[in-house]
Image (cartoon, rainbow, N blue to C red):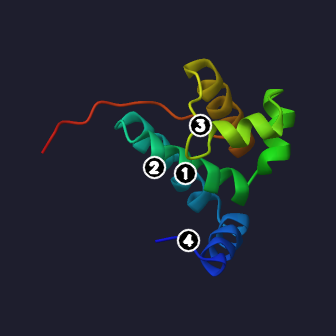
Amino acid sequence: MPITRKFRETVWSRAQSDARFRAAMLIEALNELLAGELDTGKAMLRDYVNATITFDGLEKATGIPTKSLQRMLGPRGNPTAERLFTIIQALQQSEQIKLTVTKKRAA
């Protein structure tokens, strides 16, 4: 099911006013990537970027052209690990947070 414009506007609005929501969006996107759900993780990162820093802002932070960033995080994109970690680092700096990986025992 495609995401509606109203949903995107709601996410954007909430992201503008709620730092915890923005951090949770980024964390969930990275959790999906770490779980091997590349398509879902990229889609969530794309939504996060659109709702926060924008692709133009991400270009300024990473030095990677906007069109390349959009392709990498698009449905058929295949970012290298180096580019993906460059993006993640820039997003952490933009959000002024530092994310770490911790071990969690399976239930």
> Disc 1 or disc 3, which is closer to the eye?
3
The label on residue 40 is: 2
Residue at x 84%, y 26% (from the top left corner): 63
Q: Which residue is mark 1?
A: 43
Query: CB atoms at circles 1 and 2 under 8 Å apart?
Result: yes
Could you give the CA–CA distance between mark 1 and mark 3, rounded to whole angstroms? 10 Å
Could you give the CA–CA distance between mark 2 and mark 4, rounded to whole angstroms? 13 Å
Taking the image as shown, residue 49 lies to the left or right of residue 4, namely right
Relative depth, front residue between 10 and 17 = 10
**Amino acid of disc 2:** Thr
Mark 2 or mark 3: name the one nearer the start of the chain. 2
Whether residue 105 is situated above or below residue 19 in the rendered picture: above
Residue at x 61%, y 18% (from the top left corner): 82
- Tag 4, which secondary structure? loop
> Disc 2 or disc 3, which is closer to the eye?
3
Mark 1 or mark 3: name the one nearer the start of the chain. 1
Q: Which residue is mark 4?
A: 3
Instruction: List x then y, in percent, for residue 43.
Output: 55, 51
Residue projecting furthest to the front: 76
Could you give the CA–CA distance between mark 1 and mark 2, rounded to whole angstroms? 5 Å
* Mark 4, other Cα within 10 Å: few <14 / some 14–19 / many ≥20: few
**Amino acid of disc 1:** Ala
Taking the image as shown, residue 57 lies to the left or right of residue 98, namely right
Instruction: List x then y, in percent, for residue 38.
Output: 45, 39
- Tag 3, which secondary structure? loop
